[in-house]
């Protein structure tokens, strides 16, 4: 037995499926007292019957559908679809009166300068009928005659985001939300308060820009005021500046996390002029600051930097080693040549030395 929820004079659809061969003769029956004695066979000409339709959806499977306009007396009664076949198959459906939906939840609130965004979550039990609309009432705290009510159509029975617009900046609002279906309206949610932002962009300044390396520069900024809303993103772009102050092609924006206040630009060209733009974003928009820098010709790494040997120094060391080896080789050759020349000029000295060695033996 299944339950169908509805309200008086609301188009209600009841369905059932029957497996039968040969094709069955199907009837819809309204059970007045829950037994076969008090029953009404529903026909197309019944004033409350909108339509009775049966179709074959499988080899031996049939689906029948009753579209019905219930009255107050119909709730709590059973409706049966019966198939007059060898088994006399039947299915029972109880028509229940639907209830208004349960109160909704508002788990997330996102204010901006002139709007407040609400994430609305209906409860799983919404009275048995689909939701129709959300009713939002709000007022500016401390402002007489500011109470307003607006309606938002329900897109689905899942969570939905709605936006209250045309609000005053830097103002506190009290908000409540209710859901509505064909059975009625839920009670309003617990009041929540949200304050719109002041509507200003961030204020900041660039400071301590230093190029510790000829291919990188460290950019730092100091936030003076966030504009009344959280800084959501930071972007940095840069371009080269030619001799006639002509700005070259801008780089793609580098997106940085909002809490970061410094960034090292890398892979720059040595001895080159650059213009750098830093942008800070919040709910009201963005502000930007510009600065010009010139990268160094050679590395000027200071305390705290890892030493990077210069190519010229490495070449000089290698050249010194090669030159030293050549000099030593030349000296050895000269020494050999001098000894050879000396022996040639004094041939007796060598035999004498040899004879002296023999006498000693």
Image (cartoon, rainbow, N blue to C red):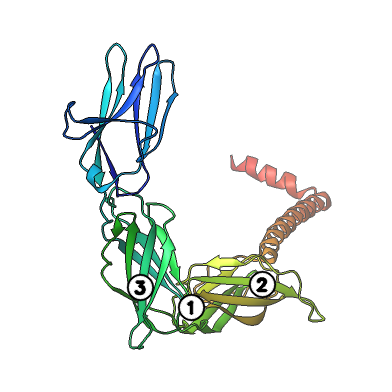
Q: Quadrant of the N terminus?
A: top left
Q: Residues within 10 Å of mark 1 (few under 14, many from 20)?
A: few
Give the label, 2 or 3, closer to the camera.
3
Label 1: which residue?
166
Q: Which mark is residue 238?
A: 2
Q: Earlier in the sequence, mark 2 or mark 3?
A: 3
Q: Earlier in the sequence, mark 1 or mark 3?
A: 3
Q: Residue 185 appears at what percent x and percent y?
A: 30, 61
Q: Answer yes or no: is residue 137 visible.
A: yes
Q: Residue at x 35, y 18 (%)?
A: 19
Residue nearest the observer in this picture, 12 or 134: 12
Please tell me whether residue 165 is drawn above or below residue 43 in the rendered image: below
The answer to whether 265 appears left or right of 27 in the picture is right
Secondary structure beneath label 2: strand
Q: Which mark is residue 137?
A: 3
The answer to whether 76 appears left or right of 323 in the picture is left
Residue nearest the observer in this picture, 33 or 65: 33
The answer to whether 209 appears left or right of 17 in the picture is right
Q: CA distance from mark 2 to mark 1?
A: 37 Å
Secondary structure beneath label 1: loop
């Amino acid at each position: 037995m299944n339950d169908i929820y509805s309200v008086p004079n609301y188009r209600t659809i009841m369905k059932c499926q029957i497996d039968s061969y040969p094709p069955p003769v199907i009837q819809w029956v309204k059970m007045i007292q829950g037994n076969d004695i008090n029953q009404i066979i529903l026909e197309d000409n019944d004033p409350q019957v909108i339509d009775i339709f049966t179709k074959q959806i499988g080899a031996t499977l049939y689906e029948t559908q009753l579209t019905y306009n219930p009255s107050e007396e119909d709730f709590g009664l059973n409706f049966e679809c019966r198939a007059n076949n060898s088994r006399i198959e039947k299915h029972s459906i109880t028509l229940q009166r639907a209830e208004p939906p349960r109160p909704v939840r508002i788990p997330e609130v996102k204010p901006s300068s002139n709007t407040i965004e609400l994430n609305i979550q209906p409860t799983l039990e919404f009275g048995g009928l689909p939701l129709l609309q959300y009713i939002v009432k709000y007022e500016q705290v401390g402002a007489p005659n500011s109470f307003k009510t607006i309606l938002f159509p329900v897109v689905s029975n899942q969570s939905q985001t709605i936006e209250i617009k045309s609000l005053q900046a830097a103002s506190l609002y009290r908000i409540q939300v209710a859901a509505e279906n064909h059975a009625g309206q839920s009670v309003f949610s617990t009041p929540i308060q949200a304050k719109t932002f002041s509507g200003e962009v961030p204020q900041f300044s660039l400071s301590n820009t230093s190029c510790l390396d000829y291919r990188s520069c460290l950019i730092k900024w100091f936030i003076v005021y966030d504009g009344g809303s959280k800084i959501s993103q930071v972007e940095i772009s840069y371009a080269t500046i030619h001799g006639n102050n002509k700005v070259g092609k801008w780089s793609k924006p580098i997106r940085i996390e909002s809490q970061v206040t410094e960034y090292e630009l890398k892979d720059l060209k040595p001895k080159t002029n650059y213009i750098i733009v830093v942008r800070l974003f919040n709910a009201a928009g963005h502000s930007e600051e510009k600065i010009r820098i010139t990268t160094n010709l050679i590395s000027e790494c200071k305390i705290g930097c890892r030493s990077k040997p210069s190519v010229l120094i490495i070449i000089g060391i290698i050249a010194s080693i090669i030159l030293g080896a050549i000099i030593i080789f030349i000296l050895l050759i000269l020494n050999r040549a001098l000894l050879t020349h000396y022996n040639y000029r004094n041939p007796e000295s060598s035999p004498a030395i040899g004879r002296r060695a023999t006498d000693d033996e």
